[in-house]
Image (tube, rainbow, N blue to C red):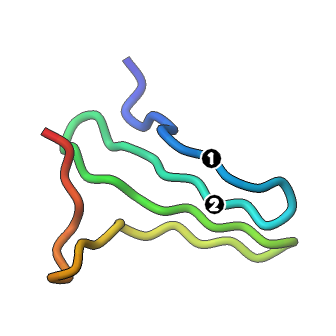
Amino acid sequence: MERFKKIYQQGTIDVIEIWLDTETGVQYVFHRNGNAAGFTPLLDKDGKPVVTP
């Protein structure tokens, strides 16, 4: 089983994806625009990581 699974994707040039860590349940946001990209935990309104049970 792969550890990370893409669960959402939006856009083609300005790309936003949500990835799920299947071991911890933590969701991550990936954003790419041209040559720049970033990958960070997805946070809820209280600043805590979003966790899928």
Residue 46 at x, y percent in the picture = 15, 82
Q: Does residue 8 appear left or right of residue 34 in this picture? A: left
Q: Does residue 45 appear left or right of residue 29 in this picture? A: left
| Number of residues whose C-alpha sits closer than 10 Å to that of mark 1, classed few (under 14), some (14–19) or many (20 or more) | some
Closest to the observer: 41 or 44?
Answer: 44
Q: Does residue 36 appear left or right of residue 52 in this picture? A: right
Closest to the observer: 18 or 21?
Answer: 18
Say if 15 sits above or below 53 in the image. Answer: below
Marks 1 and 2, the one that precedes in the sequence: 1
Q: Secondary structure at mark 2?
A: strand
Residue type at numbered disc 1:
Gln
| Residue occupied by mark 1 | 9
Residue 42 at x, y percent in the picture = 35, 66
| Number of residues whose C-alpha sits closer than 10 Å to that of mark 2, classed few (under 14), some (14–19) or many (20 or more) | some
The quadrant of the picture occupied by the N terminus is top left
For the point 72% across and 60% down, the residue is 15
Say if 26 sits above or below 53 in the image. Answer: below
Residue type at numbered disc 2:
Ile
CB under 8 Å between discs 1 and 2? yes
For the point 63% across and 67% down, the residue is 31
Residue 27 at x, y percent in the picture = 33, 53
Q: Residue furthest bottom?
A: 46
Say if 18 sits above or below 53 in the image. Answer: below
Write down the quadrant of residue 35 in the picture: bottom right
For the point 63% across and 60% down, the residue is 16
For the point 76% across and 76% down, the residue is 36
Q: CA distance from mark 1 to mark 2?
A: 6 Å
Q: Secondary structure at mark 1?
A: strand
Query: Residue 16 has which mark?
Result: 2
The quadrant of the picture occupied by the C terminus is top left
Say if 25 sits above or below 30 in the image. Answer: above
